[in-house]
Image (cartoon, rainbow, N blue to C red):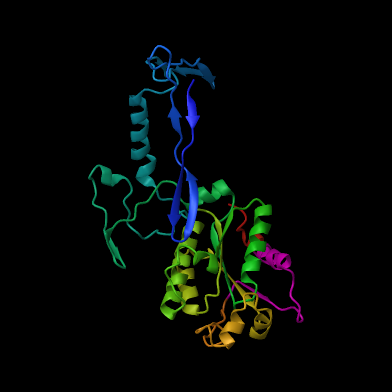
Amino acid sequence: MIGRSLRFKMTTIGKCSSIYRTSPEFDLPEPSSGKLGFQKLPACNCRGKSFGFSIFGTEVKTSFVAPLSAIEASRKAHVNGKAENVHRTGCDSNDDMRINDCHGFSGDSIPQMSTIGNSTNIVWHKCTVEKCDREELLQQRGCVIWITGLSGSGKSTLACALGRGLHARGKLTYILDGDNVRHGLNRDLSFRAEDRAENIRRIGEVAKLFADAGVICIASLISPYRKERDACRALLAEGDFIEVFMDVPLHVCEARDPKGLYKLARAGKIKGFTGIDDPYEPPLKSEIVLHQNRGLFDSPNDLADTVISYMDEKGYLNA
């Protein structure tokens, strides 16, 4: 009988230590004959197709596998047929971009090279499964819900309530919280003006990928400047960016001060803090504005329901 043992290894990343399990290793017992033993497994039935095999043996039944020539013929038919015309109206936001769409394998065409930023000689490679296919699979519309507002306005709380409400309706979401992203992807960025702009740019690009995957991406961060927010909106197709403005006055946010940041900023221990010594530019054309109701705030679930109702009305919760 084959015994299976697990191997564990300790690794350290920065100041964090973690334990992970390596790939299982198999310990083979030593037969009394001194030779490696084999165990023949009985053939089993898989949807009417029988197959069997021997561990380290020579007898293998593969009647359920199609001949390689048939597989190759099917592959060629797919490449020469469906893949030859991969564009479908409304499926791709890069309609005006020349792409490498499988013809490059035969040398029939030369793909167009691009230079974007510091990246040179790159080619956009288009695949046959596109955004609309993933949206149909998930039965929802991939989009970005961008929640902006002052620190302490309730952005993260709303994001969690919104994620929970959409999850209850069977919708797939992912939250990109400003502080959470700085724990990993953006850990190399400070809070200087240029780094804050780069922080927002990166989150916008990641949010775009989630939306393209058909996921409802909820981005929750101060994002104080219109220019950066508008640049993130421009990354997506028309209608795929929903800006939610938490219109909460500074004095209310400062009274809450859930992280104690306003106190530190007033004491001069934090420089360039939004609302104190750095400006916040309110959105001018947000899809949704959430503000005080006669001096009181609705509960996070009520605010989330407002956003969900908007999404439902606009068709985001259907493929």
Picture quarter containing residue 79? Answer: top left
Report the residue at 33% width, 25% height from top: 69
Q: Is 176 included in the stretch rendered in magenta?
A: no
Whether residue 123 is visible: yes
Question: Relative to residue 78, is residue 112 drawn left or right?
Answer: left
Could you tell whether 193 is left or right of 125 in the image? right
Look at the image and give the residue range highlighted in magenta.
Answer: 286-310
Question: Residue 251: horizontal and vertical position, in percent?
Answer: 66, 85
Q: At 55% across and 46% down in the image, what residue appears?
A: 137
The residue that appears at 62% across and 68% down in the rendered structure is 156
Is 59 in front, or is 235?
59
Q: Is residue 212 visible?
A: no
Q: Name the foreground residue: 318 vs 160.
A: 160
**Where residue 312 sits in the image (x, y, percent)?**
66, 59
- Quadrant assignment, res 245: bottom right
- Magenta-colored stretch includes residue 309: yes
Residue 262 relative to residue 238: left or right: right
- In the foreground, 168 or 194: 194
In the rendered structure, the answer to whether residue 126 lies left or right of residue 232 reads left
Q: Please give the count of numbered marks on the rendered protein.
A: 0
Quarter of the image for residue 119 reads bottom left
Q: Horizontal and vertical percent for residue 84?
A: 35, 44
Residue 35 pos. (x, y %):
37, 15
